[in-house]
Amino acid sequence: MATPSTGGTKYSDNPPAGLPTDQSRLLNNSPSSTIDGDSLLKKNNQVKSNEDNPVPKVAAWKSFISGGFGGICAVLVGQPFDLTKTRLQTAQPGQYASTTELVKKTFQKDGILGFYRGMSSPLVGVTPIFAVSFWGYAMGKKIIYSLTPSRTSKDLNYTEYAVAGAFSALPTTLIAAPIERIKVLLQVDGQSTGTPKYKGSVDCVKQVYNQGGVKSLFKGSFATVLRDSPGSAAYFVAYEVAKKKLTPKGSDPSKLNLTTICAAGGFAGIAMWSIAIPPDVIKSRLQSAPEGTYSGFLDCTKKTVKVDGLRALFKGFGPAILRAVPANAATFLGVELALVGLNKLSHPNLLIKLSGKM
């Protein structure tokens, strides 16, 4: 029976029903201690409420950091494929007979390091691009959860995943457009003349800014949105679906299956580029062409099809798909590993231990 106490509620016999086992043991082992039973009951009810609530908490900041780490992994693995894709897309008709010829000429001229030309720009830029992309995806899911408070499952459907993915492209474009503009210019620099125009990323930014100001740096932004919105929708849907399908039933979802993550990541990359390659071709041509060549996205599309046919809209598809599998497998592997690390670092027990050592 409970008797009043200035420090809380004191239990002389059995603890109240509903307390977890560990809390009951604490009370029974400490009959002479004064314990705030009301607080324990309140905490217990809160835990039960959280368990019953199907809407998960989305830690967008973790997605931001893990996305940036995944982006670094993607660049290191995918840069040679990306350079090959861009050069094929921007090459003059007949300049290269095939992808193999382009690879041979690049290697003969610049060696293995030639395939990493222009990597400094994406390596510095892709980190925030992927960070914002995965943050945007997390925020998209958070918005969907907030709009559906009465949902009975924490799992989103395909449409909701697609909406969250498409949403992620909007904030990403603000960073991606100028970075990709510089990257494309560096990748095709000296391709037709044989003499590089830019000394590096910084010099390229200076020259582009001096010629056309901020507007020139953001050239191709509309094409970037047209590429990334549907592309990101397909990207995240494919990953979520593939990961779910490839995860064995009954397995612990908290334990990473590296094979599943890499396979799902590769599948996500294929899904994205199967949709995104036509607008990517136009984006690359817009961003690499001299000022005044095209009036906009539609004009570039019309002129490209008129000169090279519809087939031109799929230039670089082979290298893009070849890059998609290893690069995006590396991306999601990096993201998932980073999330595991962040979850461990932010675990309450670890924080208590760390604070105890300080």
Image: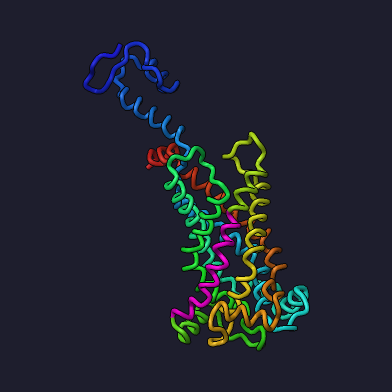
Magenta highlight: main SS = helix
Q: Is residue 70 visible?
A: yes
Residue 181: x and y in percent read: 54, 76
| Relative side of 19 to 228, left or right | left
What residue is at 56 percent from the left and 84 percent from the top? 294
What residue is at 69 percent from the left and 78 percent from the top? 110
Q: Quadrant of residue 349?
A: top left
Q: Nearer the viewer, residue 210 or 48?
A: 48
Q: From what the image shows, is residue 119 above or below residue 61?
A: below
The total of numbered circles placed on residues is 0
Q: Nearer the viewer, residue 281 or 348?
A: 281
Q: Quadrant of residue 16?
A: top left
Residue 192: x and y in percent read: 67, 86
Q: Is residue 72 visible?
A: no
Q: From what the image shows, is residue 251 above or below residue 174?
A: above
Q: Nearer the viewer, residue 213 or 157?
A: 157
Q: From what the image shows, is residue 210 above or below residue 71?
A: below
Q: Which part of the image, by quadrant, shows the N terminus?
A: top left
Q: Quadrant of residue 77?
A: bottom right
Residue 170: x and y in percent read: 48, 63
Q: Is-magenta flag for residue 233?
A: yes
What residue is at 48 percent from the left and 57 percent from the top? 136
Magenta region: 214-236
Q: Nearer the viewer, residue 345 or 85?
A: 85
